[in-house]
Image: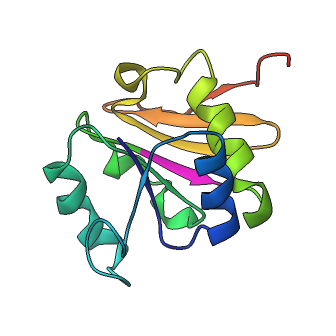
Amino acid sequence: MLLLDENLPAHQRQLLRDWRVRFRVIGIDVAARGTDDEHLLPVLHRLAQPTFCSLDGDFYRPDWAHSAYCLVWLDVRGREAAEFIRRFLKHPAFGSQARRMGAVARVRAEGIGYWRVGSLSPVSVPWPPQ
């Protein structure tokens, strides 16, 4: 399940819908609007293997890595969020739900940096050629 933070602009959510990317939104479909970051973790535990995407850098915390979900910090402009969500979901290292679980990722134009459950240091992977 793809879960989007309420901070993603509505026009970016519409782009994802246009591309037939299915998702749910915090504050609309799941949890209460304005839920604090640390209070979202129990919500993620109750969902079926969510990949949570946010423009909030506070989610890039290796101590929040858990095998039951994936956290993605979109370190890009809000108007680029949908494009980078789609690129992330198609990336060979994260292209399936199983590959995403346990990761805390930082998505940027230069590539993806991520931590996995139990890892001592982050790993970086470039974007594949388009």
Looking at this view, is 37 or 96 the one in front? 96
Looking at this view, is 71 or 21 the one in front? 21
Span highlighted in magenta in the image: 71-75
In magenta stretch: residue 2: no
Looking at this view, is 78 or 20 the one in front? 20
Image quarter of the C terminus: top right
**The image quarter in which residue 39 lies:** bottom left
| Residue visible at 54% across and 40% down in the picture | 21
Q: Is residue 85 left or right of residue 40?
A: right
Q: Where's residue 83, x and y in %?
A: 73, 44
Farthest residue in the left direction?
Answer: 46
Q: Where's residue 51, x and y in %?
A: 40, 43
Q: In the image, is residue 7 above or below residue 34? A: above
Q: Is residue 71 visible?
A: yes
Most common secondary structure along the magenta stretch:
strand
Q: In the image, is residue 75 above or below residue 62? A: below
Q: In the image, is residue 36 above or below residue 81? A: below
Q: Is residue 75 visible?
A: no
Q: Where's residue 76, x and y in %?
A: 75, 56
